[in-house]
Structure formats: C-alpha cells, structure tokens
Image (spheres, grey):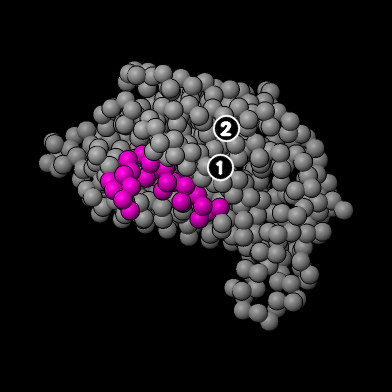
Amino acid sequence: MNPWDARARQPDGVCMCSEAAPINDRRTLFGWCVYDWADSAYATTVLAGLLPAYFAKAVVGPDGVFIAGQHFRASTLWALAVAASAIVVFLTAPVLGAVADFTAAKKRFLLMFAYLGSLFTTLLCFCGSGDVGLTLAFFVLAQVGFVGASVFYDAFLPQIAGPDRMDRVSGWGYAAGYVGGGVQFSLALLLILFHEKLGIGEGLAARLGLAMAGLWWAGFTIITALTLREAPATQSLPDRYRNWPRTAAVAVTGLRRTLDTVRRVRQYRPLVLFLVAFMLYNDGIQTVIAMATIFGREELKLSTGDLMLTLLVIQGVAMAGALAFGRLAGWIGAKRAVIVALVLWSGVVIYAYFITTRIEYFALGGVVGIVLGGSQALSRSLYGSMIPPEGSAEFFGFYTVFSKFSAIWGPLAMATINHLTGSLRLSIVSVVVFFVFGLILLAFVDEQKARQMRTVEAHAD
C-alpha cells in the first residue's frame, strides 16, 4: 500500500469531494506573498533588530539581572526565550496542521495566529527599563503567533503553486518579505536616528518602532485575508465521532491523523532524511538570525545605529539572494542550491569568530543576506515538492516541528556556552557543526524518489 495514498490514510467514513485548489492563480499568489511582506516586519524589527538591542541595553542593562540567585546576561535570557517559544509550537503544530487540513481551516488558523502575534508585538511598546519578565512574556507570545502562522502560511505553497513554479513562488514570497521588512524597519530606524529632533527619547523611539511592526503586520494581513483562497474541506467526520461535539471530534480526528502520519512517514527514508538534515542546518540558521544583533551589541560593542544599518543591508541583499538562488535551483536543482548555501553559511559562522570591527560586521551581514533568502526559500519549496498537497498543513506541521525542535537546541547551546564562558564568540562558532552535519545528510536525500511517491498518490486519487 502506497504511504501517500490519501485513501489509505483516511479515517473511517471519510467522503472525498475535492475541489481543485487555485493552482498558479495570480490573485491567490499575490495574497500569499503579501503575508510575507506583512509578518516580515516582526521578523526584522522585533526578532532580529530593535527588540534584542533594546532588551540588552534598556530592559536588562549591561550588568545583567539576578533570577533565583543566578546572574543572567541579556543574551542568555534572550536565547532561553527563543527556545521557550519554540517548545510551545513544537508541541502543538502537528495536530493543528492535521485539524486545518481536515476542516480546510488553514486560512483561519493563519489569521488567528497572525493577529495573536501582532497584538503582543504591539503591546511590547509598554515594556520599559526593568520590565524583564513582562518583555519576555510578550515576546514569547508574539513569537508563538509568528511561528504558528508560518505553519499554515507555508502549507498553502503546494496547493497554490504548480511543481514547475514552486521554487520560484517560494522565492517571491521571501523576496516580498525582505522588501516589506526592510521598508518597515527603515521607518523604525528613522525614528531612532532622529529621536532628538522629534523630541522623544531613544527608548521611546525603540518602543514606537516595535508597536509600528505590530500594526504593520496586522494591517497588511487584511489584504491576505481578502485575496488568499483555500479549497473547501474534502472530508467529513468519521462515523464514530458524528455524535461528538464538533470541536472535540475534529481535535481527536486531527490527533489520529497526526499519529497515523508519524507511523507512515518514518517508513520512507527520503522525507525523513530531509527532515533530519533540515532540523540540523536550520538550527544554525535560526540561531544566527536570533543572536546576530545581540552578538554585535555585547561582543563588538556596536551602536544601535550600526546594528540597524547592518540589518538593512541584510534585508536588501536577501531579496536579491532569494531570487538568485531560485534561478540557481532552476539550473542545478533545489537540493544542490541549498548545499551551496550551507557551505557559505559554514564560512559565515567561522568568520564571525574572528571579526572585531564594524566594517567586518557589515561585510558579514552582506554574506548572510545572500545565503539567508536562498536557503530558506529553497528548503521550503524542496519539502513542498515531496509531500501530498491535500495534506500540506499536516505535513508542514511536521516541517515546523523539525524546524522548531532545532530552534530549541541552538539557542540553548549558545545560552549554556555563553553562561559558562562569558563569550558569545565560542558560542557562535559552535554553530558550524549544525551546518556541516545537515549538509552531509542532505546530500543523501533522494528527492526524486520522494516525488515519485507523491505522483503515485496523486494518480491514486
């Protein structure tokens, strides 16, 4: 029995009455890309830009804080907060994905998480000096909203883009995100650079920039809500649950499908091998993204202006990088293009150990921008090309589980090394291990075999 055969995976009583998803529909693709434009304001301004610097300088301060008798630096607390939010999503994403597929509710879940995240991003505006617990709580909730929405956003990809356009459409989404995040971040940066002329303090300017990111995210998500289309539900509830309350029935069915998918997925080496490889190298990517600004602040003593300008460089270069790697994938294949990106990522973290000046930090940011867009966009499209489209939210739930499981260990490892040694340099160079082992495993992934499974499943339907 084919593992991807949808009928083999259906619970009892399922009725298949599918309506074709809007493949390559321009309006739908536009609405999908706009969401990347919207939520990238959070990724750039909150996760990578203003909040780490503001948290280290104003909320915690250079002397750190004592919690339960232990002294913690801002960088250690930040890494732990990133890991905590990853754990929440790790525990919930697969079941939510299965439920979303079963109810055709990807769009509703996307909007729910997006507005949860944007709300708590906006509330960060009220966190001032010494509000360590409140800032971390709001950040974790905002991060849960950001990552949770990404599960359902990514799950649309194989349903709205044909196999021949998936790499390019994924690149378009990331490119739109880098532009949108860069534009919003530029506005926030102007607030900080000209805060004196505006008659406000630097801290207030940073908080207003954070609030602006939340409002930007919420505002442009409205366009996605109006334009992104989703095919209707293709399944009815199993007979055994027909008399249950609908919420309980859907939740239990989603859990059963998740467990069933786990049993079947692990029989197939290509997809499992890719997920393990992705877990490793994505650990490195997410750790660098989350820790880059605080590394510049604590190790290089860079000013807020220098850190923000570096992020603008990354945003501008990343857009070109996402599009360029999309073309490279068309020439040599997505897997080989990701391997090229991972070689460059390894060089990035090794070089980071030796840098001492702002110019070197700027140069490093340029290289990060080139490989960031390519590695993320192509990993998403490569995975999307290997999974059955009618179970995309469920399978992207697993994708997010592996992504966020990796995002737990990288920051925790950095937090531990930093806490014991007092140096982020030793922490950052250790990330090369994740890139190297991820690259080695990725080289053994047989993506053609996985795509053949997907093709057989489609014919079976």
- Label 2 sits on a secondary structure element that is helix
Q: Residue 406: which disc?
A: 1
* Residue 171 vertical position relative to residue 357 in the rendered view, above or below: below
Residue at image point 31% right, 55% down: 134
In which quadrant is the C terminus drawn? bottom right
Q: What residue type is labelled 1?
A: Ser
Please report contact status of discs 1 and 2: CB closer than 8 Å, yes or no.
yes
Q: Label 2 belongs to which residue?
A: 434
Q: What residue type is labelled 2?
A: Phe
Quadrant in the rendering for residue 164: top right
Residue at image point 51% right, 31% down: 431
**Residue 165 left/right relative to 191:** right
- Sort mark 2 into few (<14), some (14-19) or many (20+) by Cα contacts within 10 Å: many
Looking at the image, which residue sits at the far right? 1
Looking at the image, which residue sits at the far front? 69
* Residue 116 vertical position relative to residue 343 in the rendered view, above or below: below
**Who is closer to the viewer here, 48 or 136?**
136
**Residue 353 visible to the viewer:** yes
Magenta stretch?
Answer: 65-90
Residue 5 belongs to magenta span: no
Q: Position of residue 409 (x, y in %)?
A: 52, 42
